[in-house]
Image (cartoon, grey):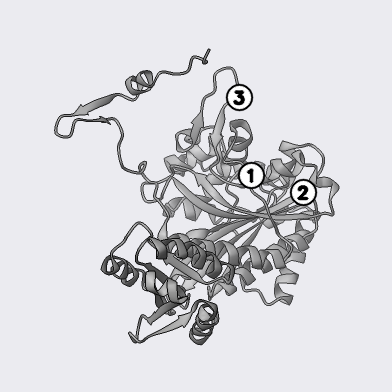
Amino acid sequence: MAKKGIRFVDIKEKLNHKIDSKRGIKTNKSIVLKTVNKTKDVFGHNLKLWKSLEHKIEKILGFYQYNKIETPMIEYAELVLGATLKNESENKKQFFLVEKSGEKSIILRPELTSGMVRSYFENKMQNQNQPVKMYELGQVFWDKTDNVFSQFYQLSLEAIGDQSPIVEVEMINTIKKLLEDFKVSNISFEINNIGCEHCRDAYAKEIKKFYKERKTKLCSKCKKALKENIWDIFNCSEEKCKAIRSGLTNFEDFWCSDCKNHFANIVEYLEFLKIPYEINSKLWGVSKFETKFVFKINHSDGEKKRNIGFGVRHDDLIKTISNNGRSGVGATLDVSVLFKLIRDQKADKEDKDFSVFLVQIGDTAKRKAFEIVENLRKENILVKTNLSKDSLRAQIAIAEKEKVNCILVIGQEEVMRGEVIIRDFQSGLQESVSFAKLIPNLIKRKNQIN
């Protein structure tokens, strides 16, 4: 007796199929043939360029010993939000949460760092040579602004397992070399010492003491910052608040010896490597886990200065995930900038990929076409066909749209003679060659355009 399965009628009812009165076809009226808002498809030429970008990143970062990693697009929410949210008042609606009944909440990752750190411990990478250097180029999901896709790509670099300041220097140098290979000129780095937890606690007390007698003169945002997040007070652009802030003691006076030496060593190496930098005392981290050092990557195009990445030492994040004293440095780059650059570079160059289109006429030629296609594939010659078409004119029209270098034509007579007609797409000249000489002929043509 056959097993009872799901009846097709049940599926139709659930999908809300309805009758199209004009054609008598049952259709699903609830399906919307449109991408989800603020997402997009990548295909055709853009997908080809994207693969070029991936290959180039893998080659360059691999040289500097950053190994590729791929982490899941979903993680437990407590891991990701704990690493992302600076304080509990931040708007969690920006993130795509999946509530699971009876289980921990799952989130579509809004960044790559937390997953990479989690993978380091879960896969016992602490048993490898330290630091473990890895990178990930992957999709993230974050509905942050109206002008940004909510599904987009990030490139993140991580170096976990070493406290030495040379780790930050190596990462900055690697990023600089990566950008230079992508023809990104005028690269500069903004850096700052943000101290450790003890340095910041001491300075926070000084800030509160300083503003206690000046609280009535502050704007509403600064008053709120004093209650919720003391560091937001440095972001205020009100002239009266900036004038008050100018009298505040410098943070440098509260650096411990370890943080001071760490920063000085980084600066010394940057000078040695001739990496352009400037110290920006207003530069702070993006979450509550940053320690000692932060840096911002800028690209200048004429008078315009654009931020294309951010990096930080995040020892506290690692200690939060696993209390074993490990340290780590991470950086995230704007992949859209790199993609635009590689797209512009490709547009300036003639596409030299060699390709042919095989036109077949008749059943005998159609059968022979399978053999020819496989022989060309083995020789790495790109061959295109449309075996469902029988018309010579229709196939040539398709070949013209594909912009191939040569058109190969075989009919029943050509198969019987063991020949194929080669027609040069640009000159229109054609010749007949034997099947045995076809591949050498095409290889010669391919070499002539490269």
Front position among marks 1 and 2: 1
Residue type at tag 3: Lys
- Of 210 and 89, which appears nearest the observer? 89
Residue at horizontal 45%, vertical 73%? 355
Crowdedness of circle 1 by 10 Å Cα count: few (<14), some, many (20+)?
A: some
Q: Position of residue 283 (x, y in %)?
A: 58, 56
Q: What is the C-alpha distance between the residues marked 1 and 3?
A: 19 Å
Do the numbered discs 3 and 2 sit on residues whose CB atoms are within 8 Å?
A: no
Please say whether residue 411 is visible from this viewpoint. no
Q: What is the C-alpha distance between the residues marked 3 and 2?
A: 27 Å
Which is nearer the N-term, disc 1 or disc 3? 1
Q: What is the C-alpha distance between the residues marked 1 and 2?
A: 20 Å
Q: Which mark is residue 327?
A: 2
Tally of numbered discs: 3
Residue type at tag 1: Thr
Secondary structure of residue under mark 1: loop
Residue at horizontal 73%, vertical 51%? 328
Q: Which residue in the structure is indicated by mark 1?
A: 71
Q: Which mark is residue 104?
A: 3
Crowdedness of circle 2 by 10 Å Cα count: few (<14), some, many (20+)?
A: many
Query: Toward which corner of the image does residue 374 lie, by quadrant?
Result: bottom right
Q: Residue 213 carries which label?
A: none
Please say whether residue 129 is visible from this viewpoint. yes
Residue at horizontal 44%, vertical 52%? 240
Secondary structure of residue under mark 2: loop
Which is nearer the N-term, disc 1 or disc 2? 1
Front position among marks 1 and 3: 1
